Structures are given as C-alpha cells and as structure tokens.
Image (cartoon, rainbow, N blue to C red):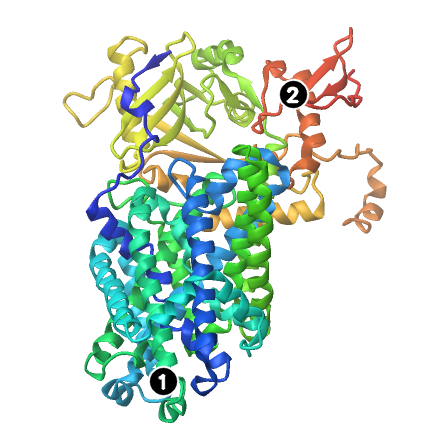
Amino acid sequence: MASTVPAVAKKAGHGAIPFSLGMSLVTLGVVYGDIGTSPLYVMKAIVAGNGGLASVSQDMIIGAVSLIMWTVMLITTVKYVLVAMRADNHNEGGIFALYSLVRRCGKWLILPAMIGGAALLADGILTPAVTVTTAIEGLRTIEVGHSFLGDTPTIVVLITIVILCALFLLQRAGTSSIGRMFGPVMCVWFLFLAVTGAINLVGNLDMLRALNPLRGVMFLFGPLNKAGFAVLGFVFLATTGAEALYSDMGHVGRSNIYASWPFVVFCLFLNYLGQGAWIVANAGNAELAATAELNPFFEMMPVDIRAFAVVLSAVAGLIASQALITGSFTLVSEATRLNLLPHLRVTYPSQTKGQLYIPMVNTVMWIGCIGVVLLFKTSYNMEAAYGLAITLTMLMTTLLLTVYLSRVRRHTGLAVIFACFFMALEGAFFLSSLSKFFHGGYVTILMAAVIFFIMFVWRRGSAIERSQSVFLPVARYIPQLRRLSDDDTIPMLADNLVFLTNDASSDMLDRDILYSILDKRPKRARCYFFVTVRVTDEPFTHAYTVNDFGTDFVFKCTLHLGFKVNQRVNAYLRQVVGDLVRSEEMAPQPIRYSIYRDPGSIGDFRFVMLRKLLTPETELSGEDRTVMSVKYAIRRICGSPAQWYGLATSGVLFEYVPLFSRMAPVTVLERVPLSLSSDLAAEEGDDEDDILSLDLADEMADVIADTEANVIGGEESADRTGVHPKVVFDDKGRPVRIERPGHHGHRHGRGRN
C-alpha cells in the first residue's frame, strides 16, 4: 500500500480557534446579537404584564430584576458557558455535536437530538424576522421615523424584507468577515448598555439587592407578581440567545467566548439594574404611566441621545439575527455528518473550518423568514410565536447533557443534581410558553415538525439502505477483474474506470460496485479505481493514500483534501495516476490519437455513479416504501455528487441499482394453452444503530446470511453499521443460525439446496 499523507494531515482536527483580542471582537458580532438585545423588551414585558408603571413597587421591581439576572446566570452562564461548552465534538458545539458524544449511551437518544435540533432550526427561521421587524418598528419612537413609517405595517414589512435580503446575501462573505463588521458595533452597543444603566443605577443603589436570588423567588411566588406563572414567559426572553451561543462555538472558539462573556453579562446586568432604578424612580409619574407601550429602555435615556439609542438598537437588532443564522449552518453541518440530513454543498469563506456557509440552508432560511414577515406583518404578532420552540430545544439539551455527565464524564451525582434543577427550571419556562401556542406558537412548532420529518425520513431511509448493504473483500475478486480486463471479446469502456465510494476501509467494497462491474453488463477497463474523498480540518491539505492490492490495475484511493480545497476529483485523480505510472506501480497508457504534440501516458477516465432505486418488486412495507420515496425525492432536490466533485464536464455514467438485492418472491408462471389467454387478460391488475433501525436487525442478518452462502468472499463481508452477525453453518455448508454481537439468542437460518 502506498501513502503520501503528510504528518500535518494526520494531526488535522485537533486544533481549536485560539484566543485573541481580534477574535474576541468578532465573537461580539457573531454570538451575542440575540441575547444582547434582550434589554429592549424584557423589562417592558414584565411591567406591562404586572399592570403597568402605576402598579409597580420597589420590592416588585427588585424581585423582577433578580429573577432576570439569576435566570441568565443559571441558564446561560452555568448550563451553557460552564457545562455545555465543555461538551464539544472536535471544537464544534450545538445539540448535534452533543449527541455525537453520547450516542453510544442509548439508542433512544437520537430522538431528543432530532427534536431539539429541529426546534432550534425552526427558531432560527423566526428569529431574524422578529428582531429585524422589531428594530424597524422602533424607529416610530422618533418623530421623523413615525411620520415616515406611519401606523400601518406596509412600509415596515417592505423595509424588513429588503434588510433580510441584504442580510442573507451577506452570509456568503463568511462569519469572520461579518464578525469584523458587526463586532465593533456590538462592542459599542454593550458599552452603551452599561453606561446608560450605570447612570440610572447611581440614583438608587438599593437595586443592588437584586443580586440576592431569594428576592427573585419571593417575587415569583409572592403577591407582588400579578402576572402569575406567565411572568416566566417574559423572563425567559432574556436567555433566548443561549442555545445559539453553544451552537456558534465552532465559529469563534470556546476561549474567545470565555473571554468575552464576562464583559457581555456585566453590561447586561448593569442595564437591567439601571432600568429597574428608573422604573422605581418614576413609579408615581402619571404622565409616563399613561404612555402607550411604555419602554423603560428608551425612556430612561435623556431626550438628546434617544434618537441615537433607537438607531443603535435597530442596528443591534439586525445583528441579533446573525447568531441564529450562523448557528443554523453549524447545526446542519453536524446533522449531515450524523446522516440526519442529506449531503449539501458547503463552502468555507475563511481559513477556519468552523466558519462555514451552506448555500441551500441560507436560501431556505431566507425564504422562510420572508414568509414569516408576510404572514405576521407586525412584531407583536411574531412575538406570540417566539420562544416556544427554543424552550423545547433547551429541555432536549439538558437531557443529553445529563447523559453526558453521567455516562461519559462519570459524574453521576452531579448529573442527577443538574437534571433535577434544570429540568424543573426549563420545564417551568416551557409550560409558561405553551400559552403562546394558539397565538402564533403553532407556526414554529409546525416548522419544527417539518424539519423533524425530514430528519426522520433521511435517518430511517439510511437505516433501510444499511440493512441491505454488504461490503466484500476486493482481494477475492482480483482474478475475475484481471480476466475481465484482458477479455478482448468485451469492448473497452475506458482506460480508467472510476467508482466514487463513501466507505473508510482500504480493502473492502460495496457489493453494488462489484455487481456493477462483473454482473451488470461487465465493464472492461485497463484499470479500476475506487475513490473516497475525506475532508480534513486544515484548509489546504493535498494528500492521498492508495492500496494497489499487489496489482498494477486495481487501486483503492482516498483523497485527503483540505476544507478550502476545490474537490475536483478528476484533476486530482489524474495526478495520482501520473504518480503511479512514474513509480512503475501502474503500466503506462499510451494515447494513439490526440490534438496535442505530447499526449502523455495517461488514458481516459470514466466515472460511474451508482444510485439506488425503488422497484415494484422491492420487499418493503408500505410505510418504509413511502419513507424511501420521500428520501429519494429529497436527494434529487439537493443536487448531484457530479457537481460536488467537479465532474460536470467529465465522462459520467449514472447507473441505477435496486434498493434491495433480495426481492419479494415472484410466483412461478404456468404456461397455458393459447385459447385461455383472453380469459386471463380480463383478470390482470392487482452505526449507526439506533431506535429508528432496531427493527431492521433481522433484515440485515438475512442479507448477511444470503451473502455468506452465495457470494464469493461472503464470509468476509461486513455491513455499514459495524454490527456484523456471524452465520453458523452445518457440516453440509448450510446456515443454521445467526449469532449477533452482544446477543445470546439464536435464530434458525434458511436451508440451502
């Protein structure tokens, strides 16, 4: 076996984005937009929910601010910053990265991961629409802005759509570029929050009593809380960006979040305390109490700087949507690796692998956001749908983190405390948010259900395919491949016949590939190449490994390409062949006809793409047949591998193979006299192992048994799940039972003639 993988390629994937002041500034622009704009509406909602400015008291406001601060401290700081961000998968965060760490601890864990991921992606579609619309509507607090926008939502909707279009078009520039633009703005925003809050806090230092968590508990369960349990729905809005903070970890690096979060939370707390001090100082002001939709955030500022505050908050609201968009890219990338979503084209605009851009996801979110704006029209209507989905995601994250702490980190006692506390806390938030369901919350739940359905279809469909997939040893087929290559009675299809594979082994091949070469119209070629593409964590890796099986015409090659490298398989494979010819591991392929003076010694290439296809004879239940039909429809929408690998201008042969090698039995035809044919004509017509694939274990075992008994090298075959049942044969070579790893029960195999 030859190899040209450099040491640097082998070490790829172990580095994280390091701390730097510049990257910490980028972090402010990428991660904290959503949670950073919460002071705009949290205190406003709490005061309005408790009867307005005329009904508040100092103890009530101190308790409300305490509840906000300790909710942010517990959920965001403790759960996400201190606990969740330690559970990273190769420096990537998010619920799917967390699931990848605990997937072996329980087959059922795939379900909370899918529910949480679907809910977070749905929230990512709603959040940009809410924040941008809210920011634009905020311009009405300025006299000039109100005269321009008017009281109808038409102009606001048009401006919001234009801004959303610009925002999503901007995504292709990359997280780093966006962060460099937004980072300084968010730094100014947080400093503005701190300064305005501190100025008002100086007038009433009694607000510092809100640092006592008991004041928040007393307010929640005491008579001062006129909103009752529903107040938690308002308080929860202060933490809506926490999940995005975890998801965006791969974009900016954990160390930069650790460095910037104390600054962010300090500024947020100062502003909440300042708003509380202003509310207490103006509780008896009848003129302010009569103001419609009073917003303490703007009212506590001097009139001279209020216009600046509105404009700055509008820009911050625009930036707030960025965290969810970039987090969605990371989530989809992780879901693709877990085979929960189809393979999509991913680009990396910067030199860091965590900073990615997925065009199709960007387009879908773009369309979804505009649809939400056109449906709801005002931020008041959108806020009714806001927050319900994200509470569901937080509950699922807590569940997975509990498993991580108890089973992976072996901290059982800590895991029990963690689960009891955060399940109770977030469960309360979820129950309080359920009141939003019939007021718009059903929209996010519906979007989450659609995304969950796509994940279910893809995962279940992949499990069905795996149940029939068998890998065979290439070495056992070398003699047949040699005879086929030398057989002059069969026309030469290509000098180099190339099959693209996705398995990591160096000496096995999917049965479908070998069947295509040998059984389905034998494909003669001088050389056979089986190519796998692996993307490394470094940007510009150019390396390959190749196994020649001791021959000069059969090669299994793995291309190791950096994430910034254009995956033009045809160009790189030509280089590999050139290396093999020069090292005399492969015979030259002289070209007799060419327009070039020196045509070289490398022949032509033909790429074969195998696509599985449902056939009428496929032995499959009605439900699973529907699943496979939907999966293949989704696959068609997501594009062709020929485009991903730069083969659009190459010789590509698409070949369809049946989904199953074992079909439903066909009834034997009986020949009847010709006179009966008219009577008969009138009667015509009639890995990833998880809970979604457990029922397919017997199906997989049957296929393995068929393979071992009937296929050359079948006893050395392997399935994609890594759970290879062992077939036990009797003294006559017939399978009598199947022994599965980890199971002691036996099942009789079918007899053979």
Instruction: Give the mark nearest the N terminus, 1 or 2.
Output: 1
Q: Is residue 94 left or right of residue 604?
A: right
Quadrant of image for the N terminus: top left
Is residue 295 visible in the rendered image? The answer is no
The mark lying in front, picked from 1 and 2, is 1
Q: Is residue 85 left or right of residue 432?
A: left
Q: Crowding at label 1, few (<14), some or many (≥20) Cα neighbours within 10 Å?
A: some
Q: Residue at x 30, y 78 (%)?
A: 298
Q: Which residue is denoted by mark 1 in the rendering?
A: 282
Q: Residue at x 45, y 45 (%)?
A: 84
Q: Which residue is denoted by mark 2 in the rendering?
A: 707
Q: Nearer the viewer, residue 542 or 301?
A: 301
Residue type at tag 1: Asn
Quadrant of image for the C terminus: top right
Q: Is residue 94 left or right of residue 160?
A: right
The quadrant holding residue 266 is bottom left
Q: Crowding at label 2, few (<14), some or many (≥20) Cα neighbours within 10 Å?
A: many
Furthest-left residue in this view: 597
Percent x, y of residue 153: 38, 83
Disc 1 secondary structure class: loop
Give the vertical position of 287 relative to 176 (above or below): below
Residue type at tag 2: Thr
